[in-house]
Amino acid sequence: MSRRRFAMPTPPGVADFHTQGAASTGNWETDRADERWVPTHCSFCGVQCGMYLRVTDEGVIGVEPRMDTQNRGKLCPKGVAAYQQIEHPDRLTYPLVRDGGDLRRASWDEAMDRVVDGIRRIQDAHGPHAMATYGGASMTTEKTYLLGKFARIGLGTRYTDYNGRMCMVSAGAANNSAFDIDRTANPISDVAEADVAILIGANVPETFPIFIRHFWALIDRGGVLICVDPRETTLARVAQLHLPIRPGTDAALLNAMLHVIVAEDLVDHAFVDAHTVRFDEAAASVAEWTPGAASEVCGVPSTDIVTAARLYGRAGKAMINHARGLEHQIMGTRNAQAAINLCLATGNLGRPGAGYGTITGQGNGQGGREHGQKCDQLPGQRRFDDPGAIEHTAQVWGVDPSEIPEKGVPIFAQLDLMEAGQIRGVLNFCSNPIVSWPEQARTQKILESLDLYVVSDMFLSESALLADVVLPSAAWAESEGVIANSDARVLKINKAVDPPGEARTDIEIICDLAHRLGRGQYFTYDSPRAVFDELRHASRGGRADYYGITYERLDDPAGIAWPCPSQDHPGTPRLFEDLRFGFPDGRARFNPVTYEPPAEEPDDEYPYRLTTGRDVAHYLSGNQTRRLGYLTDQSPAPWAEVHPDTAAAHGITDGDAVRLTTRRGTTVLATRVVRTIRPDTVFVPYHWAPPIAANQLTISRFDPTSGIPNYKACAVKIERSTDPATPVPIPPVPTGGSDT
Ligand code: SF4
């Protein structure tokens, strides 16, 4: 098999700071008397690259390299530009309240009174569970922990959830069902040590650019890379095998690979017998999934399915990693389970280069899902039905166990309750659902129907524009705290400057609200460190045990991978090295996977599959990155990516405006005609707001186990358009009204 490393296209922008020197020495000072360097990590994706922020009396003026185990002194375009948010003129610097239909400036007292009056009115009339909180996983872990606590004993509601519902929950549900823990099993660096690595539904060069070095290292060592993706990504282009799968059909492919592994007896029987249960059920469940049958469903040639299965099944050490391409489906959890079934059948777990990983999308997508912000979880990844979980949490919080409400439901089930008038108020911290939730028209209608909708954010997002009250919050560089990267390494971010104007940290906002609601005795923190110390105790003994991690230990930019149960514990970079899994019997679970077609299949009226994803220059809803000129210059607007055959069938040439229409909505975008996408598939990146938002088109259907939206496959039609694609201006921050 030929090595094609030399043919690697230029990755989509990785800045190499290696030669700039000083940072790699650990020297935090510069020669300039008016400048200091603050060690921290990037605010964006789950790689969480190390960086220094350059700070002078004028504020944050730039970024410098910081060597950590992930980035080795490199940053992608987003990381290079991240500091520009901090002094950005669009920052929210004072609260806003709605008056007569418009937002106007208000004092903190007026804004908080408006929030508290609204909460009291709703809860007096409809009970405590008529309020809900919704948080972002880009916040520090302290903030996410505190928001979950505030929902439960500040508001007394069972309805809290987080925006990882759109990100990691399918992977988490699958991990829990197979291993009884929600964490990547192996560090991503293990890819470089594998003989064979399978990457499914993960456009690493665009979404986690710094991780690409592990895949290059694999290829340079002579390892085999297999990429599964409807698009030939820049990494798929140099893989030994690219399987251009039809969107939404991953389980068919993975079941067929297990079929081949069973049929050709590539099973590691010693591992299966000693360390797993339900293998026979899983093997029986794939009996019908011959490569030919799977090929009909997933569009991958059956010979390539067999080749992939043999390469993987015969490898001494093999890795599987996936991301949202596999997970953003009604089959998301089952797809991830099908991937894990392959690891278990071949004994690929618990060794360097042999294992499994899910790549985290959001900056703190791992830490934000560990300590109680999720609807069904208490701190430390405790579940409500874990023995003693409620009692332990209540003891740390200083409340009676009966004061902790029962577990809630995922945010997208809460939307049904909002439509039914059962949930009437939402406090939204650090998320932009108008852009990021599916079926944007429905989202807007629901948010507009609430009696109270409050947003805390650093910029006036499209969702904040609909709020009754907008609270200006601090950016990541304006307070300290911890995050956990994609490897579950807990890292420390540090404060560089004060928040601008009257902006406050979310910790201050939550504690102030609790005091005004008469629950202040449970929210008496004088610093993020105090919140973290309580979190350590709350997580103690749980799956995500942080008890042994301290701020001091996190001065090392490599951080500490949890679980870390004591201060002399080194952390756990790789799970399952002792081949014991989280269940009481110590065995991992096979989960037989039943295939179900995507939520909406193409038909005569809507003949293509729409799939959505990310662009290297932008982050999530784009609320931060769409304001940064360096990034918008690279990527000013979304596009519709189609194959030349598709374009020709509709008389479209590269750059033409094209109208995309689904049963939910329509938009006009510029076309990119490329040979690197399936002819039956249309790709649109999702970082922009209406009227060019991908989520005007997507469908409100959800994985029944994880509650993740089905972003990756719905039916769409395309037409050449005489209307041009429309860029969206950034709305100005309102002024006027009362001052402080
Ligand atoms: Fe690193 Fe991700 Fe930030 Fe890019 S966006 S610099 S890859 S953490």
Image (cartoon, helix red, strand yellow):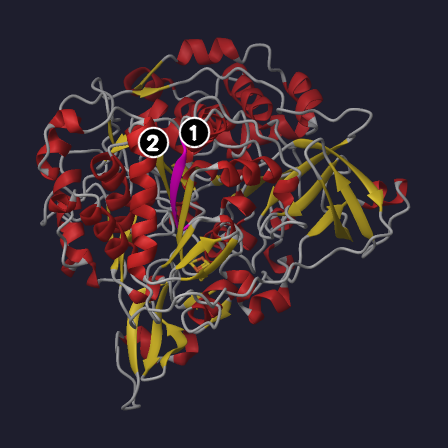
Q: Residue at x 48, y 49 (%)?
A: 218
Tell me: residue 141, above or below residue 182: below
Mark 2 neighbour density, 10 Å: few (under 14) some (14–19) many (20 or more): many
Q: Residue 411, how many percent across, how many down?
A: 43, 33
Secondary structure of residue under mark 2: loop
The quadrant of the picture occupied by the C terminus is bottom left
Q: Residue at x 31, y 60 (%)?
A: 108
The answer to whether residue 147 is magenta is no
Report the amino acid beneath label 2.
Answer: Tyr
Marks 2 and 1: in contact by CB < 8 Å?
A: yes
The quadrant of the picture occupied by the N terminus is top right
- Which residues make up the magenta segment? 423-430
The yes-or-no answer for disc 1 within 8 Å of ligand 1 is no
- Reading the image, the residue beneath label 2 is 159
**Which image quarter: residue 257?**
top right
How many discs appear? 2
Between residues 208 and 162, which one lies in front from this camera angle? Answer: 162
Q: Is residue 222 left or right of residue 29?
A: right
The answer to whether residue 427 is magenta is yes
- Reading the image, the residue beneath label 1 is 414
Q: Residue 630, how many percent across, how many down?
A: 56, 71
Tell me: residue 470, above or below residue 544: below
Secondary structure of residue under mark 1: helix
Tell me: residue 122, above or below residue 83: above
Report the amino acid beneath label 1.
Answer: Gln
Tell which quarter ligand 1 is in.
bottom left
Main SS class of the magenta portion in the image: strand
**Residue 704: mark:** none
Q: Is residue 113 visible?
A: yes
